[in-house]
Every structure is written in structure tokens, then in C-alpha cells.
Amino acid sequence: MSGHGSDLILVLNCGSSSIKFAVFEAGEGPPARVPAWNGKVQGIGGSTPDFGETGVPPFAVTLDASDPHRAALQIISERLAVRLEGRRIVTVAHRVVHGGVKYAAPIRVDAAVLADLISYVPLAPLHQPFALEAMEILLRERPDIPQVACFDTAFHHTLDKVERQLPLPYAAWERGLRRYGFHGLSYAYMTVALPERHGALARGRTIVAHLGSGASLCGMRELRSVATTMGFSALDGLMMGTRTGVLDPGALLYMMEIEKLSLQEVAHVLYHQSGLLGVSGISSEPRVLLPLEAGDEPEASRARDALALYVRRIVREIGAQVAVLGGLDLLVFTAGVGEHSAEIRKRVCDGLAFLGVALDPVANAADATTISAPSSAVIVGVEPTNEEWIAASHARRLVTG
């Protein structure tokens, strides 16, 4: 960290069960890519929430059950005060999942912008409400600190209309029912990191697989989004930790008409009880399910089924994006599963052998930046994402002009 009195940018990434934060030096030029420090409160809403930050191992915290997110923000505020040591937070950047049709670039937050963003809560209920709660608190309690909203949907505004339009009556398009795409801050970072790593190859036909608890793909040409798997909401596309991904809408009609589930019950199934957790009945995380596959007991069978479906959906959607791109030059894995699960990467790439994809098993096991074999027709890489740095960079440019 720089010395006493330096200015800082705080980045908040508020989700349904965690609030992550990162603090960057706000010096001349772009912020350094490594934050001065970062941390998170996780397990919000659960029985054992904890807090951890740079240099401090996670420790249990108690959150007010009536408003645990506000309590988590208060803990972060108190911890920041301890570490500021005379420095100032001069800007707060927020990751905001949904910017709708209106917001295609980062924007300074005021009361009117906040009111707009509240209308998008139904499109991203796992994230949007909690980012907006943090904005509202800061607008009221610290109006002197500029806030900047950085939108996950903004990166995909380069999609052609044919990629954005849904096969619904045209009036739906006019009302804003369309494919938006998400994980845009992650993909925006790739447009910086991949040319540094792979040179001109990154400007060709590239697919980035953002595989975390939420998951999506983005097909790029010239580092611009031309195809993505998430659509109108963050439920679409790939099978995820607890979310369905793409689903026959007839199944929803059946659940509501025949099984008599309410709208709220269906929403809970789609967002919280499906995906890897739903199929396996065990866990939403591949790292938990992979060791359970061996054996003949029902638990092992369900773990195998969940992982097989998870991988099949990734392979299927990569194949669809290859068709849109007209081929594939570079495949990149990022986010928690993409960066750290060599076995999931291997299974996905085995399913893409028809494209000439071949892995170097030693490089893959080591999570190397390039994991494809010399004989591979497609370069395969692993690139850690850095959404917080993108948000900090956006905020600095917007506030300083």
C-alpha cells in the first residue's frame, strides 16, 4: 500500500449470501490490478456467517437476522475504518448485475438512477436488491462520496439484434423483453488480459467460459461480445450451482398448472433448488461432488448424473457458440470452477475433441495459463478474472473525467 493520506476506491460486490469488497489505490492513471486489500462477509442468511480479509483468516460474525445484509455492510465499514489509517475512500464502485436497456456504460449513482435500477430487481433477484441497498445507505449516510454503478449487462450491448431478440410477439421486444447477457465485468477483464497473454489470437474467434456458482459463456470476435448464453435473466444458458440454465418453458407451465406450484415456489425452485444441487441432492459445487462419484450407492450415482449433465450443457453450448463464431481459435476458462477444477476442464475439452481440442495433462493439473497440447487445433487457456479491478477502473475514469 502507498503511504499515509493516499486516496482509495472501494469496490462492493453484493450478492444474496455474500458481500465482497476490494480497495484500490486511486493514484494517477489506472489502479494497480492487485487491490491494496480485499475481503468478504459470506454465509449471509445462514447459521454460520464469517468475515475474512487480506491478512486476517475468516472468523465467525453475528448478523442481525432482521437485516443481515445491512449488518454485513456495517462490519465491512468498521473494518475499513480500522485499516484506512488517515486515507480516504474517494469513490465507491458497485457491481450491478442488470442495467436493462438504458444503461450501456458505468454511471454516477443518484436518487433517479437508483429508482431506475430498482425496477430491474425481478430480473436479477439474487444480486440486484443487495447492491441497491448498499447504494441507498451510502447516498443517505455519505452523500459526499461519489458512487458508480458498473453493469454486468453493459458488455453485451454489442450483440446483434438477432442475438438479443426473443421469439415472442414484437410488443415484448418493445417492452424490453430481450436477451441481455451477464458476467460482463468478467468478460471486460478478459478483453484486457487475453491480448496480453495470447496476442493477436485473442482478437479472433474466442470463447470465454465463466464457470462459478453462476456460469455463462461469451463468444467474442475482435474482443466484442457476439454471443452469450445468459439471456433475459441470469437463469438462462448453462446449468449452474443451484440454477437451472436453459429450460423448456413447458416444464414451468406443468409445475404451475398440474403440480399447482405458486409463482414464488417456482421461482425458488429455479433459482435455489436446481442445477448441481438439485440433480445431485448433495451439493452445488463440483469440488464436493467429484470425490463422491466412485461407488454404487445412490449418492454416487446422483453425483455422477449431476456432473455429467453439467459438463454436457457446457459442451452443447460451446458447440452452439462455435457455430455462431464460424470456428474457434481460443477457449478460456475463468471464475472459481473454471480456474481451479482441472477435472471439469478435462471433461469439457474431451467433449470438444471433434474440434481438435487436446489438453496437456500436466499443464492442466497445474492450472497453467495455457493448458492445450502442442497438437491442439484450439489454444486452451486459464485466466483468473478480476471484476473488481474493472469496476475500480471504470469508477476512476468516470469520476475524474
Image (spheres, helix red, strand yellow):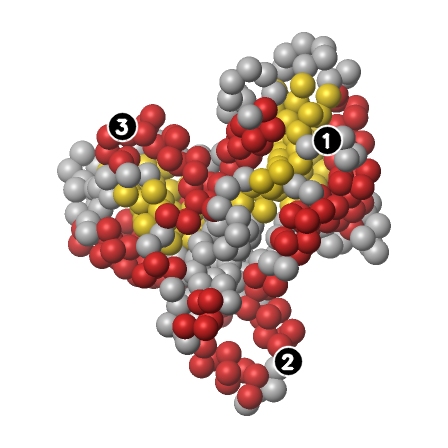
Residue 143 in sight here: yes
Q: Secondary structure at mark 2?
A: loop
Image-quadrant location for residue 91: top right
- Where is residue 201 drawn, in percent x and y? 24, 34
Which amino acid is tagged 3?
Gly
Count the numbered circles shown. Answer: 3
Q: Secondary structure at mark 3?
A: helix
Q: Residues within 10 Å of mark 3 (few under 14, many from 20)?
A: few
Q: CA distance from mark 2 to mark 1?
A: 42 Å
- From the viewer's perspective, tell me whether residue 52 is left or right of residue 101: right
Question: Of all residues shown, which one is farthest toward the bottom?
Answer: 258
Mark closer to the chain start, 2 or 1: 1
Name the residue at 64% across, 80% down: 262
- Where is residue 162 drawn, in percent x and y? 32, 61
Which amino acid is tagged 1?
Ile
Q: Vertical placement of 365 versus 217: above or below?
A: above
Q: Which mark is residue 262?
A: 2
Q: Quadrant of the C terminus?
A: top right
Which of discs 3 and 1 lies nearer the camera? The answer is 1
Q: Residues within 10 Å of mark 2 (few under 14, many from 20)?
A: few
The residue where tag 1 is placed is 145
Q: CA distance from mark 3 to mark 1?
A: 39 Å
C-beta proximity under 8 Å, tags 2 and 1: no
- Observer-nearest residue: 269 or 57? 269
Q: Residues within 10 Å of mark 1 (few under 14, many from 20)?
A: some
Name the residue at 39% across, 36% down: 190
Q: Which mark is residue 199?
A: 3
Q: Secondary structure at mark 1?
A: loop
C-beta proximity under 8 Å, tags 3 and 2: no
Which amino acid is tagged 2?
Ser
